[in-house]
Amino acid sequence: MADPRTLVVIRHAKSDWGQGLPDEQRPLNERGRRDAPAIGTWLGDNTGGIDLVVCSTAARARQTWRLAAAALEPAPAVRHDERVYAAGPQDLMSVLDELADDVATAALVGHNPGLTELVDVLTGQAVQLKTSAVAVVRWEGTWADVWARRAALVAHATPRG
């Protein structure tokens, strides 16, 4: 049997709606900039390390990860993927399916409602992913086994700064 895979699902921190920017360009607001580092602290305290981060190309997601990663030593490799922006669970599962076999733990930094729906589809458990929320799911097998939808929810938190 293949080694277990761990997926850390991270919803971006609170964004700024007041600048009149296109959705994908909206940055974090003050609260988001304060909360994002707390995500990194939580990850450092509650995960055994992350091998790869797949992050939405939206400014608020990239900024969230940059601030969170500062709390991690070493900071994991990050790949920005435009498919994560505004993606539903099927699209997100396709992104995960492409991960290399040597990645045991991956983080996915993105947006709702897709992330909440992904956790529900994979685990059968409804969790509310507020801004800055983290859900950790695990299954036995490869990344391609994400399609089996037999993951277990092992942690859920909303770290705040």
Image (spheres, rainbow, N blue to C red):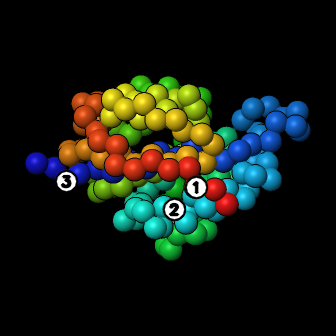
Image position, residue 110 (x, y; %): 57, 40
Image position, residue 98 (x, y; %): 36, 40
Image position, residue 5 (x, y; %): 28, 50
Q: Amino acid at mark 1?
A: Pro
Disc number at residue 42? 2
Image position, residue 154 (x, y; %): 34, 49
Toward the viewer: 59 or 46? 46
Question: Total label count?
Answer: 3
Toward the viewer: 140 or 93? 140
Q: Which residue is tagged 1? A: 159
Quadrant in the rendering for residue 160: bottom right
On screen, residue 71 above or below 56: below
Residues at circles 2 and 3 in contact by the CB criterion of under 8 Å:
no
Disc number at residue 3? 3
Image quadrant holding the C terminus, namely bottom right
Q: Earlier in the sequence, mark 2 or mark 1?
A: 2
Relative horizontal placement of residue 25, taking residue 40 as reference (left or right): right
Toward the viewer: 138 or 91? 138
The answer to whether residue 119 shows anywhere in this view is yes
Q: Residue at x 52, y 35 (%)?
A: 128
